[in-house]
Amino acid sequence: MSELLQEAVHAKRQILIDQLIRSGVYKIKNKHLYEMTLNELEEEFFTIGLANEPYQDTYMECSN
């Protein structure tokens, strides 16, 4: 994976982790957020409805 792609994945993961923590989510299925893949974090983000929260724009801007 190129360095630029790795940085982008890391940035997206960090944004999702920050938003999940702000909403009170620290672990999912006995797994710490930092142990989860980007896909797992995105799935949880949309499953619990954070995509409809006011700060969703921060995530959406970085997902393009």
Image: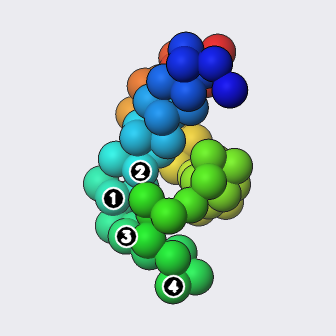
Q: Position of residue 35 (x, y in %)?
A: 50, 64
Q: Name the residue under label 3.
A: 26
Crowding at dot 3, Cα within 10 Å, few <14 / some 14-19 / many 20+, comes out as some
Q: Residues within 10 Å of mark 2 (few under 14, many from 20)?
A: many
How many numbered marks, from 0 up?
4
Along the horizontal axis of the image, is 6 left or right of 18? Answer: right
- Label 4 crowd (10 A; few <14 / some 14-19 / many >=20): few
Quadrant showing the C terminus: top right
Q: Would you say the residues marked 3 and 1 are in contact, meaning their CB atoms lie under 8 Å apart?
A: yes
Q: Give the image's coloring scheme.
A: rainbow
Secondary structure, mark 2, is helix
Q: Which amino acid does label 3 sit on?
A: Tyr
Say which element carries label 3: loop
Q: Earlier in the sequence, mark 3 or mark 1?
A: 1
Q: How far apart are marks 3 and 4 (CA)?
A: 9 Å
Mark-to-mark CA distance, 2 and 4? 15 Å
Q: Looking at the picture, does residue 7 appear above or below residue 35? A: above
| Separation of residues labelled 1 and 2 (CA atoms) | 6 Å
**Which SS class for mark 1?**
helix
Q: Which of 8 and 43 is in front in this view?
A: 8
Q: Mark 4 points at which residue?
A: 30
Q: In this view, does 57 lie above or below 42?
A: above
Which x, y percent locates residue 40? 66, 57
Instruction: Looking at the image, tell me whether mark 1 or mark 4 is earlier in sequence order.
Output: 1
Query: What distance separates the C-alpha of mark 1 from that of mark 4?
Result: 15 Å
Residue that label 2 marks: 17
Residue in the foreground of this view, choosing between 59 and 13: 13
